[in-house]
Amino acid sequence: MASISLTTSLLGLIFIAIFPSFTFAGDPYVFYDFRISYITASPLGIAQQVIAVNGKFPGPFINATTNNNVAVNVRNDLDEDLLLTWPGIQMRRNSWQDGLLGTNCPIPPKWNWTYQFQVKDQIGSFFYFPSLNFQRASGGFGPFILNNREVIPIPFPQPDGDIIMLIGDWYTQNHKALRATLDAGKDLGIPDGVLINGKGPYQYNSTLVRAGIEYESVPVDPGKTYRLRVHNVGISTSLNFRIQNHNLLLVETEGHYTVQQNFTDFDIHVGQSYSFLVTMDQNASSDYYIVASARFVNGSTWERVTGVAILHYSNSKGPATGPLPDPPNDTYDKERSMNQARSVRQNVTASGARPNPQGSFHYGQITVTQTYLLESAPLVTIGGSPRATLNGISFVNPDIPIRLADQNNVKGAYKLDFPDRPFNRRPHADRSVLNASYKGFIEVVFQNNDTTMQSFHVNGYSFFVAGMGYGDWSEDKRGSYNKWDAISRCTTQVYPGSWTAILISLDNVGTWNIRAENLDKWYLGQETYMKIINPEENGETEMAPPSNVLYCGALRSLQTQNRHSSGGPNFAGTWRSGNILLMALLGFILIFY
């Protein structure tokens, strides 16, 4: 025991010597090096340019534990600006690390920049992706797992393994071509397929699926139970997820444990993440299909827009054959899907990231301080181009991040005048931001007057999905709200011709994005930001800009290039050399102890 104690002390000294600037917090660090670059891949059998992370498509997963400090050094080897964003990671008091143009200046080509943030009091299943220039349509995404601390139990038996599934619609054109299509005022059209973990469909049908496409095969052992973390990383298509002859036991979504219930299939909308427990309780006469198929579309026209992977038992007797398991038979009827969404409720008896029940926050008893009705509508023409809007405003990204402009007294970078409801006025483009009150408890109603399914996301927060329904929202709809165990999450679906109401406690200062998660609508301006500052700010509520802050726009002259370019010292180089030294000293310690 004495040798172990001495070893631990020496390792602590080594860490301090190598990372003197990272010892201000008592929680551990996890470190990642990400090189974002183009590679050639053929996920649907056609060679195309995709965005890889460390040469992988999709990218590697980030694996952290509650309260860890996370450092991700990002090297931009693309030919255009880059930012990575981490939806669902709340960046407490630290929107400087959020990775959107309203919060960060972009990382120029051939530069590197290190994100540093703490995953404070969070658990669950998330993913990261590039937020600029429609890049997510070419890849650059990967999973982000936050584990419970060992002292906090999970509300189900420990699974025998974790399985990550990134599902999403896919085009064989890259993001630049798709971007040009949108810029020309055209619709993207039907996707070319659905990928599962960056791979195309298993050839379940020789007419619909060409031969030779690489598909995902998931190895499992009979009798074991696995946790499937499923993320819809696509552009705009809601997907129905199912596994032939297997039940999906829902247990978690976007950082909160759910009331556990079995489903034969489940709708996962763009930007959403879910965890299911799946027990391998079938015989192994053959493999089984894993399917992700398009929802709310014409089945015959969209039949090829189906992702198919294989669940392979270790004692399987042969390949999967025959037709796919049937999709829900409600192509144009949203009632089944909406009822399924309403059934997702919070497990109020389970502990989350902290040793107290998640339901101890009695949100239903708090007085709402402000209501925002955010209306989306079909595309409109603004300045000769088609644009997407919220409350008739199509957002124009600022040249300088909002809080950086504030702290450097840059005037006119944005307007703090976003309306709390739609007005009968001509749609226009603007840099209009919500002036939200710190410690307020707000009601946000997403009113979808468009004809397509939408997802909406709020950065920096989890919110309670209080209710959803058809038609126009009105105040009397509050009588249908779930005021006890509504699920808390960061991305919610809003059905066409319908509304979804969420409740948010504004306790996280900073600038936080509200957006359509559908990439086409987001790219065309369907977003805004909430600016939340403490009126009694004493310099401690919101974190200061990081020491490596990037400058752009009118502040570009403040940027010291060699601090961030490939020619200068960088965190990744320090970590690599430090890692070598650490391993060498560790070996020395183990020899003598």
Image: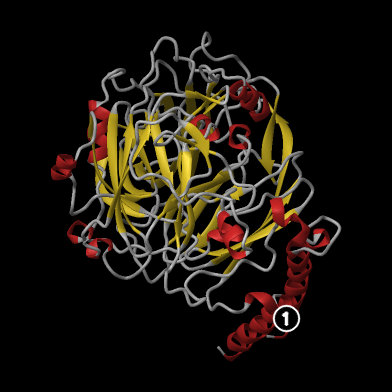
Residue position marked by numbered label 1 in the rendering: 17
Is residue 484 shown left or right of residue 209? left
For residue 287, which quarter of the picture?
A: top left
Is residue 184 shown left or right of residue 92? right
Three-letter amino acid code at disc 1?
A: Ala
Q: Residue at x 63, y 58 (%)?
A: 410
Say whether residue 552 is visible.
Answer: no
Q: In which quadrant is the C terminus drawn? A: bottom right
Q: In which quadrant is the N terminus drawn? A: bottom right
Residue at the limit of the structure toward the right, as seen here: 567
Q: Residue at x 47, y 44 (%)?
A: 528
Answer above or below: position of 13 versus 43.
below
Viewer-proximal residue among 396 and 197: 396
Residue at the limit of the structure toward the bottom, as seen here: 2
Q: Residue at x 58, y 91 (%)?
A: 2
Viewer-proximal residue among 94 and 174: 94
Residue 291 coordinates in the image, percent (x, y): 43, 27
Residue 96 coordinates in the image, percent (x, y): 58, 60
Picture mark count? 1
Answer above or below: position of 118 versus 253.
below
Judging from the image, the colouring scheme is secondary structure
Q: Which residue is drawn at 47% across and 53% down?
A: 512
For residue 47, which quarter of the picture?
A: top right
SS category of the residue bearing label 1: helix
Say whether residue 149 is visible.
Answer: yes
Residue 253 coordinates in the image, percent (x, y): 36, 48
Q: Residues within 10 Å of mark 1 (few under 14, many from 20)?
A: few
Is residue 484 shown left or right of residue 113? left
Answer above or below: position of 341 versus 451.
below
